[in-house]
Image: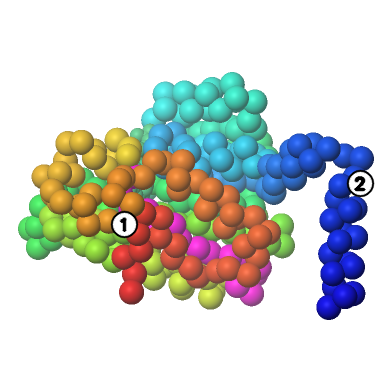
């Protein structure tokens, strides 16, 4: 006990004697944290707006070179210009994740500009239908499953040989809380997001021997154009805001830190997890 007290008090004195002021030590810790992803390369789909854009900014702030992408050239240009204007290392290209040639271009852009890939974050997702599951046409089923479920797996299969070369890597899928608590009238979308929970688990076991971890972000309702919190959502679920723990909707930035963590060495023993960011956990 005495020895323990002595050690603690020496450590305390040592802290006080340090010639480096506390504020400088704190900012140097912050600088270390900012470099958690230094020299790493992140490819992010659906990253010119909303949740994907917030993730792109955060990974770049934490030191990664980020390849931004989405369907529309003007969105890519605007997002790249904004983040480069903040001094961040980003490049971008058009990639509709449902198109094989666009996925190929995304892979080529990452290799050409950044020399490899360490992280893939699959944010792009669509929901063209508000209506009954059984009334959905085959085209609607195909579109939702193609973009939301198949494209992350197909893009990863194209990137995998390059990620393997780096020895370690991380993949983050983006599901939704509707995977656990389905919203009526969004049945096909709910189903696609539930499939992603399973895809995360399957890929995690398949890629573990290669040193690649796979996890899944499960957002609640986040204020973006996609969720149309003001317009569409109240019609679908009038009291949704009231039943959730923090009694408010989330901001895109509140989804970004966890993705940076899941890519970082701090998460080196975490794979196959579906992690809810919803102001409340709908999981049992
Ligand atoms: N917002 C929420 O409440 C919420 C909750 C749970 C899960 N999510 C999921 O989070 C993801 C992002 O949603 P968000 O709310 O951030 O949406 P958002 O603000 O509308 O942004 C969507 C982004 O994806 C791009 N995009 C759309 N379709 C694409 C495609 N086929 N291929 C490539 N890029 C595409 C868009 O740019 P372009 O138009 O240029 O393609 C844009 O950059 C989606 O997977 C969604 O299901 C959202």
Q: Nearer the viewer, residue 117 or 3?
A: 3
Q: Nearer the viewer, residue 160 or 124?
A: 124
Residue furthest front in the image: 2
* Residue at (15% x, 44% y) in the render: 234
Label 1, label 2: how far apart the Cα atoms are: 45 Å
Name the element at disc 2: helix
Relative to residue 130, is residue 91 depicted above or below?
A: above
Can see residue 191? Answer: no
Location of the N terminus by quadrant is bottom right
Residue furthest bottom in the image: 1
* Residue at (68% x, 59% y) in the render: 265
Q: Residues within 10 Å of mark 1 (few under 14, many from 20)?
A: few
Relative to residue 220, is residue 134 depicted above or below?
A: below
- Which residue matches tag 1? 245
Q: Position of residue 272 (x, y in %)?
A: 50, 70
Magenta region includes residue 212: yes
Q: Residues within 10 Å of mark 2 (few under 14, many from 20)?
A: few
- Which residue matches tag 2? 17
Magenta region includes residue 191: no
Q: Nearer the viewer, residue 79 or 104?
A: 79
Figure quadrant, ligand 1: top left
Quadrant in which residue 28 is drawn: top right
Can see residue 230? Answer: yes
Per the rendered image, the range of residues in magenta is: 208-222
In the image, the residue with mark 2 has its CB under 8 Å from the nearest atom of ligand 1:
no
Quadrant in which residue 188 is drawn: bottom left
């Amino acid at each position: 006990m005495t020895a323990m007290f002595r050690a603690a008090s020496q450590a305390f004195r040592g802290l006080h004697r340090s010639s480096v002021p506390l504020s400088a030590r704190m900012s140097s810790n912050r600088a270390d944290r900012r470099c958690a992803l230094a020299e790493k390369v992140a490819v992010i789909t659906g990253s010119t707006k909303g949740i994907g854009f917030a993730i792109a900014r955060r990974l770049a702030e934490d030191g990664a070179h980020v390849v931004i992408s989405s369907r529309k050239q003007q969105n890519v240009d605007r997002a790249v210009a904004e983040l480069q204007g903040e001094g961040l290392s980003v490049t971008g290209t058009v990639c509709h994740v449902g198109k094989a040639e666009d996925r190929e271009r995304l892979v080529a852009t990452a290799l050409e500009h950044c020399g490899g890939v360490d992280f893939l974050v699959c944010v792009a997702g669509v929901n063209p239908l508000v209506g009954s599951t059984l009334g959905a046409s085959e085209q609607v089923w195909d579109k939702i499953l193609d973009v939301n479920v198949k494209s992350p797996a197909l893009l990863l299969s194209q990137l995998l040989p390059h990620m393997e070369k780096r020895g370690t890597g991380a993949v983050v899928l983006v599901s939704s809380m509707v995977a656990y608590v389905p919203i009526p009238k969004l049945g096909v979308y709910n189903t696609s997001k539930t499939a992603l929970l399973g895809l995360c688990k399957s890929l995690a076991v398949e890629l573990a021997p290669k040193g690649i971890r796979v996890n899944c972000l499960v957002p609640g309702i986040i204020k973006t154009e996609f969720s149309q919190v003001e317009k569409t959502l109240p019609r679908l679920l009038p009291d949704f805001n009231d039943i959730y723990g923090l009694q408010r909707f989330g901001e895109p930035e509140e989804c970004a830190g966890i993705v940076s963590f899941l890519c970082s060495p701090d998460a080196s023993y975490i794979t196959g997890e579906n992690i809810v960011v919803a102001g409340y956990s709908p999981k049992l």
